[in-house]
């Protein structure tokens, strides 16, 4: 097991594609190379062939309180010929130990292809996204919805990109689960090979500007024309909608659901608490299905809990167990509020007992501690502590990550 060089990345890309049941494509390796960090990879070889892999990206993610550094874990794969040999356990152990030993990011985050894999490594399900389908013509904005007095402009990518960046950077610092997009990450986000489109158009860019000409919302989407004997029934596939104002949000969604020749507007990675439901005359015209999104792992409990902020003042002693990263096991006193936080080892009696998996699940404020307690995953030693701690960990809105990394 060793890191690989940038020159070896195409071979690794082909291996990972095959594990995920896809045909390899050279352009995939090229876009991956733009954000690849060789020193943060770990690959197992059998002879000259890669048989297992994992890597991490250096990124920021917004947590309750603001952006913080996270290790974005990705490209986790084991060849079907080499399963049940402990390779994944070794890679996960290597990755987390390296983060701990070098005091790098205190939190690791990933998207799981299969939800049953990562709980045994201390990752907790921390955020869900929704697949959304907006049915036309039933979906109409209510007449009293304020869209402002601005305008929506359709722009080519090069002209749109600086405006998208400006809006996204304003939004992401306040939206838990959003990632930074420095360097080549915008190129990664807007990657749009023809084989992905399934007959749809190239990406379109609609930018809303307020009455003063300032961009405050955008939509990135594809269109797919379809016709039946009864008439047009095209589809709009939304890759992303971001808005820094309520009027911009309403204006962009109004633009999308009022496009001509369209029967449905879909979004595969919408927020779990998408506000669109409350803007349309018929909420039933917005169909949603929740699915697992971000899994969070606290690498170092003390550093991770001190890095976020809390909705109400908290002073609690946690008895933490961690079978996979034993350096985390023990009791911690967590104190904090909306402005600052501290988490230190203590010998005081515990108020709550829980695992690092549970802490990962509640870290972004989406999963509540009360929910985990109801599932029997938290032990309350001091009555009332679950309720107060659950409130303190809450986020203003559900965490939402619109991009898979």
Image (cartoon, grey):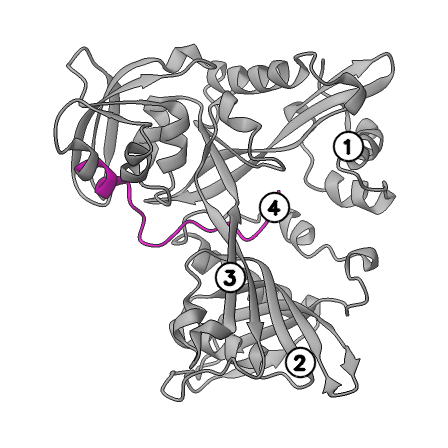
Question: Which secondary structure, mark 1?
Answer: helix
The image quadrant where one finds the C terminus is top right
Q: Quadrant of residue 394?
A: top left
Check if mark 3's residue and mark 2's residue have beta carbons within 8 Å. Answer: no
Which residue of the protein is positioned furthest toward the left in this rendering?
Answer: 383
Range of magenta residues: 388-405
Query: Which of the two residues, 221 or 245, is positioned nearer the viewer here?
Result: 221
Left or right: where does residue 78 sit relative to residue 335? right
Q: Would you say the magenta stretch is mainly helix, strand or loop?
A: loop
Question: What x and y, as percent, mark residue 37?
Answer: 67, 31
Dot 3 corresponds to which residue? 288
Q: Earlier in the sequence, mark 2 or mark 4?
A: 2
Question: What x and y, as percent, mark residue 9?
Answer: 79, 31
Question: Which secondary structure, mark 4?
Answer: loop
Judged by depth in the image, the label closer to the viewer, 3 or 2, is 3
* Residue 230 versus residue 94 in the image, above or below: below
Check if mark 2's residue and mark 1's residue have beta carbons within 8 Å. Answer: no
* Residue drawn at x 16%, y 32% as measured from the top left: 385
């Amino acid at each position: 097991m060793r890191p690989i060089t940038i020159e070896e990345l195409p071979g690794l890309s082909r291996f990972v594609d095959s594990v995920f049941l896809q045909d390899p494509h050279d352009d995939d390796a090229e876009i991956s190379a733009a954000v690849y960090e060789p020193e943060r990879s770990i690959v197992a070889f059998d002879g000259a062939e890669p048989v297992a892999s994992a890597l991490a990206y250096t990124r920021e993610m917004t947590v309750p309180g603001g952006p913080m550094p996270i290790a974005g874990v990705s490209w986790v794969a084991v060849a079907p010929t080499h399963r049940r040999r402990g390779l994944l356990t070794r890679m996960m152990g290597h990755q987390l130990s390296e983060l701990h030993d070098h005091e790098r990011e205190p939190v690791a985050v990933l998207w799981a292809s299969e939800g049953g894999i990562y709980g045994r490594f201390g990752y907790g399900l921390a955020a869900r996204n929704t697949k959304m389908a907006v049915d036309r013509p039933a979906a109409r904005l209510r007449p009293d919805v304020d869209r402002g007095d601005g305008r929506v402009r359709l722009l080519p990518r090069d002209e749109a990109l600086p405006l998208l960046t400006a809006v996204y950077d304003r939004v992401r610092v306040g939206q838990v689960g959003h990632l930074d997009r420095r360097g080549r990450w915008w190129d990664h986000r807007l990657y749009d090979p023809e084989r992905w489109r399934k007959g749809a158009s190239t990406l379109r860019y609609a930018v809303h500007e307020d009455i003063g000409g300032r961009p405050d919302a955008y939509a990135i989407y594809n269109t797919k024309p379809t016709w039946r004997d009864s008439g047009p029934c095209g589809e709009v596939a939304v890759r992303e909608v971001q808005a820094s104002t309520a009027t911009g949000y309403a204006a962009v969604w109004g633009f999308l659901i009022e496009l001509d020749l369209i029967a449905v507007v879909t979004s595969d990675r919408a927020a779990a608490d998408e506000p669109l439901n409350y803007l349309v005359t018929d909420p039933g015209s917005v169909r949603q299905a929740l699915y697992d999104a971000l899994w969070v792992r606290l690498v170092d409990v003390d550093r991770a809990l001190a890095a976020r902020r809390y909705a109400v003042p908290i002073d609690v002693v946690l008895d933490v167990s961690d079978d996979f990263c034993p350096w985390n096991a023990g009791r911690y006193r967590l104190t904090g509020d909306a402005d600052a936080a501290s988490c230190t080892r203590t010998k005081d009696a515990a108020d709550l007992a829980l695992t690092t998996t549970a802490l990962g699940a509640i870290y972004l404020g989406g999963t509540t501690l009360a929910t985990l307690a109801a599932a029997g995953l938290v032990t309350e030693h001091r009555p009332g502590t679950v309720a107060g701690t659950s409130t303190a960990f809450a986020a203003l809105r559900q965490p939402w990550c619109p991009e898979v990394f």
